[in-house]
Image (cartoon, rainbow, N blue to C red):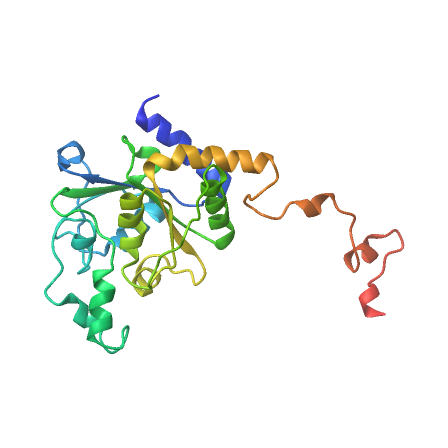
Amino acid sequence: MQEIERNKVLASRYRELLSIPGSLVALKMLADAGGFASVRRPRRRLTLCQQLAQTYYLGRSTLLQAGDMGCYACNEILGLGDLPKDAWKRYVGWMTLNEEVARKVIEAMPRLQKGKYSAAVLMPLERCPVEPDVVIFPGNTAQMAVVIGAYVHTRADVLTMRTMGMTTCAFLIALPMNEQRPSIVIPGNAPRLLAFPSLTELLCGLPGGMLEELAQNMESMRQKGTTRYPPAWQHIGLEPQPPIADILKDDGAPSWLK
């Protein structure tokens, strides 16, 4: 099966398994952007999280190179360039207590190897012609529980969430690429304000090479009645209980008003 056909099938399976309303965002890091030269570059310098949201909500494909993103950290996260000098100082006194904390937070930010890539391409998974490095989507805790269950289903491992409320894209992209493990992230301030406005949804980054395995595990779990989405289903076979049961009887009445 050609890669694009495989990705179409995977996108359909994930939408069905997790009830994802948007486009799963396929991200591929490129050493040479030539193979994707026909994909448009951004017209404005938006943030990386905004570009991810445009793919998720609008189905847009975008080629990103150094200088295309309006966020100081994106080039460093993707290995396309360097942080501005003393970038950590912008957080002192509000996000962090002092300079030492701010510097250590930025130093702990996951990032891709510098100089290895020249661009990143974002597109809906169903239109991606190659195996993506990461697939990204937002979701609620019940959806993320299915992802976690699928990861644990075939390995003796614990999936640990790592996040720090800042540089969300680093944990969403660089972390799953570097460690080849799913990454579930609590969105920081920037993606909540600029990209994914939900007060409750999380963000998930899945290594591209793990998509087939996780989908198979989700399907197996669903058939066996374990973790699934939507999570509530057992009630459809239970005898109705009061108070709703009282009004469903032939001589039913609102017993809660008596």
Give whichever of 245, 183 is nearer the camera: 183
Residue in the image at 82% along x and 63% along y: 254
Question: In the image, 18: left or right of 115?
Answer: right
Q: Residue at x 42, y 49 (%)?
A: 159
Q: Quadrant of residue 196?
A: bottom left
Q: Residue furthest top?
A: 1
Of 194 and 212, the residue lying toward us: 212
Above or below, comparing residue 3 to residue 141 in the picture: above
Q: Position of residue 95 (x, y in %)?
A: 28, 73
* Residue 199 visible at all: yes
Give residue 202's position: percent from left, percent from top: 41, 55
Residue at the image point whose x is 38% and y is 31% from the top:
8
Q: Is residue 14 above or below residue 247?
A: above
Residue at the outermost right position: 251
Q: Residue at x 59, y 42 (%)?
A: 226
Provide residue 206's location: percent of width, then percent of height: 36, 43
Asked where in the image residue 209 lies, by quadrant, the reply is top left
Q: Nearer the viewer, residue 37 or 7?
A: 7
Q: Is residue 44 visible?
A: no
Numbered disc total = 0
Name the image quarter holding the C terminus.
bottom right
**Quarter occupied by the N terminus:** top left
Say whether residue 195 is left or right of residue 91.
right
